[in-house]
Image (cartoon, coloured by chain):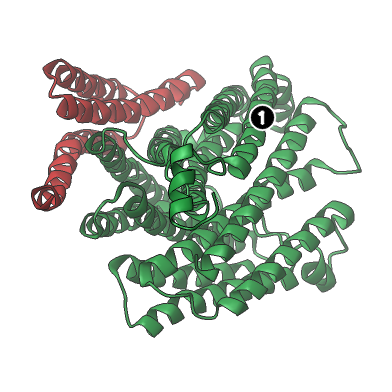
Amino acid sequence: MTAVQMLGTSLLLALFVLLAGCYGVLYCLARLRASRRIGRAAAAAYALQGLTAGLLAFSPLDFWWKALLLASFVAYLPIPPLTWRLLENLHEPEEQHS
Amino acid sequence: MFRSQHLALKYFAAAMTLFGIMIVAGLLASTQYVQDGFLLNILDFSVTKMLHIDTMIISLLMGFIGAVYWFVPIELERETVGIRLAEVMFWIFCAAVAVVAAVFIFVQYGPATEMSLWFINQGRKYVEAPRWAAIGITLVVLVFIYNVVGTAIKTKKVTGIMGVLMVDLIPLFGLYLIAFPSITNMSEDQYWWWWLVHLWVEATWEILIGCIMALALMQLLGTSRRIVETWLYIEVALVLGTGILGLGHHYFWIGTPSYWLGIGGFFSALEPLPLLGMVVHAIYDAGAHRMKTTNKPAFFWVMAEAFGNFIGGGVFGFMMTLPQINLFTHGTQWTVSHGHFAFWGAYSCGVLAVIYLALQKSRAAQQLDGAAWKWSFALLNIGMLGMVGALLVSGISQAFYERAMGGSTLQAFIEGQTNVWFVQGIVMRLVFGFVFAAGYVVLIYDLLTIGKKRTAAEGLQARVAGGPA
């Protein structure tokens, strides 16, 4: 791996997780404000994460790391909605009670 | 207030004092990077760095212990068992820390004999305390375990959070014993030493702060026990699932078998996933309560913890954790950048949140707000972001020029130290270190004063209740 490849790959890896965070935050904001526009922004962040994963496919990382990145890209998708649903289900009895 | 909570306030005061010493030592060490020969042969870099790291660890440990002493009587609705012994141990702990710091500063090093191990320095990074002091820390933790478990047994009550906490105290104590043996084989020594460092930080401490934050959320936002306990169990499963074998990312280059490259890389890559769940939880809570709380500083520090943990641990960690990248980045300022951000996000912010919670209760303030905490919050976070950004620039320069281009030779290392990117990053780290230090000064002012001035309505209410106006 050359110096430029090392730097490019590491920055793409950081961007990969950062975009996952953006997707999660925007998804939550979209739910809180019932905003379709923010929802679309969340989808865009996730799409950009996919694009980053695609760019990482051309990096000099070994095949299995690329496969792991692809798998984790897929795994990030349901985390915000599942967590949100879990939290709603947990809070629901308290809200009904109050 | 329970005596246990008075003891907690003492622990918080000690933690904040050590936090200040950590900053001073950090500024000295940063200056030594910028100014060659600064305090040479008086207080060498090896000493200032050791003080910086060790005070950080002890400061956080004292913050955690204080938080548990604060919450145990609330959780179990009685005074902590063995509180007198705990109070004695607190003073012994403080005295031991002071003596060790004095030895580090004034004696610094000794001959390669058993005597040095016992009285000067055990020589193992992060746990350098001489053996007598390490035994003292072990006793403090044993008393701490006795306090927590004894109180639970006495009340015959084990809540979900207390159950997790008590189980977690076993590795918290057991892993520290790894600080003692002096193993001559370097690889073997590093192998076990990482059990202490990594598994303390990314397993037992994560669970400990998880328990503390669960208790804090119940107090801060009135979140129900069912919710925080369910979430705690999920967090424990996810953190342990990814964190324990994430240990492998420390085994890449210390002479351990090559299968650790796969294990370490795989589990480290999974570590950001639960952190994203925590971010979602934080935003949900903030939204559910419409950012309304009677303790704004605690609330904002809780939020800072969720985001800081994700970015510092998740983003900065993932950037350099895969073996092919880590080959170039390990041991550079890049790692230091990740370490600063992750410790700040995962632990320090949480401890500060709990301190604000405790102050609100101890000062019987209905509302905790003001300008000072906002200044300290901004300065500390801007200072931290500036430092990690600057260190990242320096670290990238090292990995790029010294490692990837220079081939990690001694010549490349020397040239790397004078590279303009490296030097500018190191200078900016010092600048932002001063910003961080300014934030600390405001923080201490705020902690000493916040909630002491009562509003007219609170004063009237206190007079009606027969309390001090």
Give the structural element (helix, strand or loop) at label 1.
helix
Q: Height in image: B15 above or below B2?
A: above
Residue drawn at 40 percent across, 51 percent down: B246
Q: In the image, residue B114 lies at what x, y percent?
A: 81, 73
Hue used for the chain lettered B: green
Using the rendered view, name the quadrant where residue B204 is placed. bottom left
Report the chain holding disc 1: B
Amino acid at the residue labelled 1: Ala
Q: Can you give x and y, in whole percent of width and height, for residue B287 in the image?
A: 24, 34
In percent of the image, x 53 and y 33: which residue is there?
Answer: B373
What is the crowding at mark 1: few (fewer than 14 residues within 10 Å), some, or many (at least 20)? some
For residue B132, what is the image quadrant?
bottom right
Query: Where residue A9 sits in the image (x, y, percent)?
Result: 40, 25
- Considering every residue shown, the one lying at the far left of the view is A96
- Residue at numbered disc 1: B438
Q: Nearer the viewer, residue B22 or B86?
A: B86
Task: Answer with the quarter of the image where residue B164 lies.
Answer: bottom left
Residue at point 40%, 40% (across, down) = B299
Res B100 visible = yes
Q: Nearer the viewer, residue B124 or B282?
A: B282
Q: How many marks?
A: 1
Task: Judge whether B116 appears above or below A59 on screen.
Answer: below
Residue at 30%, 53% in the rendered image: B235
Q: Residue furthest right?
A: B41
Question: Is B153 left or right of B411, judged from the image as shown?
Answer: left
Image side of residue B229 versus residue B301, left or right: left
Left or right: B457, with A78 as reference point: right
- Tell me the colour chain A is drawn in: red
